[in-house]
Amino acid sequence: MIRTSSAARRLAGTAAGLSLAALLTACGSGPAHQGAAAVVGDERITVSAVEAKVTAVRDASAAQPGGPRAERAGLARRTVAELVLDRVIARALADRGASVSRTEIDQAREADAKLLGGPDALERELLGKQGVPATGIEDFYRQQLGLQKLAAADGQDARSAAGDAAIRKALVTAGTALRIEVNPRYGHWDPAQIGLTDAVEDWLPQNSTLY
């Protein structure tokens, strides 16, 4: 069960386009940037929500045997992308009269934990392979099950090329309809690519605050 479709793996946009000066100037402008990391439809994704998830990943990684690990490049941007994608998936599912239940999440999580040798082993696997801290496991399964359901709604297997195409089509349609705005420090949401583009990697010093 623990896997990501190729549509989801292509979330992170490539660094391009904006100078640091332009990026800093743009941070306070526009409706999506007044204390928000992004606006998805009528919903704001706050900077504090992004910061909390980034901190959770950092803390979980530091607690692993061997001590602190180097922070992954673009962690904040990836977090924003994941939070936006969660809303896009939810919209695509709603358009099809579908959703992911808590029971389905619990069942998938328990099945994977059993295969890996228990909940602790599952947490280590998700953190090491997917960068998902314990506090993000429910969201991870909601996203993965949602992608599977989008493929199934088109009669496809999410692991197949046809399933991936069905997922991408659904997400492009939903993302376009939602009119997503992202704070330019994280990039721009491109509905066609289902991800962030035009961001600058690692423009903040390693030890500075995120925001």
Image (cartoon, helix red, strand yellow):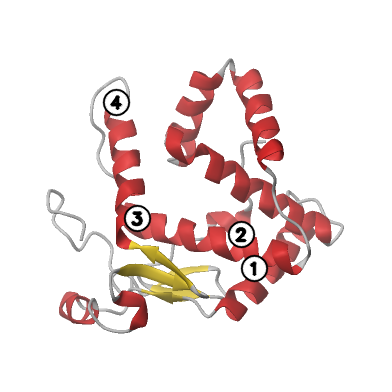
Q: Earlier in the sequence, mark 1 or mark 2?
A: 2
Residue at position x 62%, y 61% in the image: 89
Task: Locate residue 121, reporting x and y percent.
Answer: 51, 20
Q: Earlier in the sequence, mark 2 or mark 4?
A: 2
Q: Are marks 1 and 2 in contact (CB under 8 Å)?
A: yes
Compared to 60, does 51 lie above or below? below
Q: Which residue is mark 3?
A: 50
Q: Secondary structure at mark 4?
A: loop
Q: Are marks 3 and 4 in contact (CB under 8 Å)?
A: no
Q: Which residue is mark 2?
A: 7
User: Residue 36 occupies which quadrant of the picture?
Assistant: bottom left
Q: Say which amino acid is labelled 1.
A: Leu
Q: Secondary structure at mark 2?
A: helix
Q: Earlier in the sequence, mark 3 or mark 4?
A: 3
Q: Say which amino acid is labelled 3.
A: Val
Identity of the residue furthest to the right in this view: 155
Left or right: 171 with respect to 76?
A: right
Q: Which residue is mark 4?
A: 63
**Alpha-carbon distance for marks 2 and 4?**
31 Å
Numbered disc in front, either 2 or 4: 4
Left or right: 130 with respect to 22?
A: right
Q: Which residue is mark 1?
A: 171
Q: Earlier in the sequence, mark 1 or mark 4?
A: 4
Crowding at dot 3, Cα within 10 Å, few <14 / some 14-19 / many 20+, comes out as: many
Q: Say which amino acid is labelled 2.
A: Ala
